């Protein structure tokens, strides 16, 4: 049996493309639909109730497009809405916080974990809760980094302005001697090079993109939802949608995915 329905993935902007890219690498025969809510980015400075409302709207829309699973490729939306959405909708829904927290607990040696995330994700306490469910003795040092997302959405992923901002956010984490840092926002893997430079090679950077792609594969396989290709070249298609200027999203998205993409506006 083959299930041709697409996988739905959403974020407030381009950040979730880091998750989409892993899903496409690991599940190349799956069709995907990506939605970037660029009209309302950033989510990370908003009230969690408001973000939950946005997430529900987008999940309903993706379900109307007949997706077989929804991937919340946004930490802020996961913190705000995952549990409520899982309780509300029939379709399987996965979020990025649990896989990232689990990976960090496995990686740390000195049991000091840093979490770099948006203001709302830090305020939700979601990472701290999940890490402590796995190992209550780990020290979790959370750092809100509200200026990163607007920079990344403008395509600024390195250079002096980014470097200066990163120094400011990373210095407190360095002072706490963390040995693993969770990139608790799906935008941040796009700036992992400067973050790595500042933190040094002894600090491991954890992003949940790869872990979540594995989880999506496992869920689809167990439920018999995988798409079976007709032949090895029968790869899945990706459709891209956004809520603001599609040209701008296409330009930035093509750069980050290293392939030309077409984007439709909603
Ligand atoms: N990429 C998102 C996250 O993982 C949201 C960034 C934002 O819109 O503030 O939290």
Image: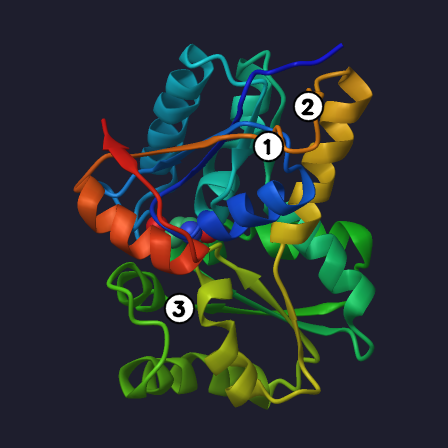
How far separated are the C-alphas under marks 1 and 2? 7 Å
Image quadrant where one finds the N terminus: top right
- Colouring chosen for the image of the structure: rainbow
Horizontally, residue 69 falls left or right of residue 259, namely right
Query: Residue 36 location in percent, x, y?
Result: 34, 40
Residue at which label 2 appears: 229
Give the residue drawn at x 30%, y 68%. 147
Element class at badge 3? loop
Give the residue drawn at x 57%, y 86%. 199
Element class at badge 1? loop
Residue 44 visible in the displayed image: no
Residue 178 visible in the displayed image: yes
- Evaluate if marks 1 and 2 touch, with contact meaning CB atoms under 8 Å apart: yes
**Depth check: 32 or 142 in front?**
32
Point out the tag, 1 or 2, that comes first from the N-terminus. Answer: 2
**Depth check: 158 or 143 in front?**
158
Element class at badge 2? loop
Residue at which label 3 appears: 145
């Amino acid at each position: 049996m083959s299930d041709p329905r697409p996988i739905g993935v959403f974020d407030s902007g381009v950040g979730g493309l880091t998750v989409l890219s892993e899903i496409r690498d690991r599940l190349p025969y799956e069709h995907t639909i990506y939605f970037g809510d660029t009209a309302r980015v950033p989510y990370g400075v908003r009230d969690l109730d408001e973000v939950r409302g946005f997430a529900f709207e987008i999940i309903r829309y993706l379900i109307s497009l007949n997706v077989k699973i929804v991937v919340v490729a946004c930490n802020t939306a996961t913190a705000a809405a995952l549990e409520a959405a899982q309780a509300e909708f029939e379709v399987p829904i996965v979020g990025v916080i649990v896989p990232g927290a689990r990976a960090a607990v496995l990686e740390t040696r000195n049991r000091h974990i840093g979490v770099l995330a948006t203001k709302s994700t830090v305020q939700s306490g979601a990472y701290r809760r999940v890490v402590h469910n796995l190992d209550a003795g780990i020290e979790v040092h959370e750092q809100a980094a509200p200026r990163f997302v607007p920079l990344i959405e403008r395509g600024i992923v390195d250079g002096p302005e980014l470097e200066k901002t990163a120094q400011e956010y990373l210095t407190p984490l360095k002072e706490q001697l963390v040995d693993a840092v969770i990139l608790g926002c799906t935008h941040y893997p796009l700036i992992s090079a400067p973050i790595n430079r500042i933190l040094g090679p002894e600090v491991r950077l954890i992003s949940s993109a790869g872990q979540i792609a594995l989880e999506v594969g496992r869920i689809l396989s167990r439920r018999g939802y995988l798409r079976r290709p007709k032949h090895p070249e029968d790869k899945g298609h990706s459709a891209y949608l956004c809520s603001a200027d599609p040209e701008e999203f296409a330009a930035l998205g093509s750069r980050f995915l290293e392939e030309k993409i077409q984007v439709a506006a909603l």
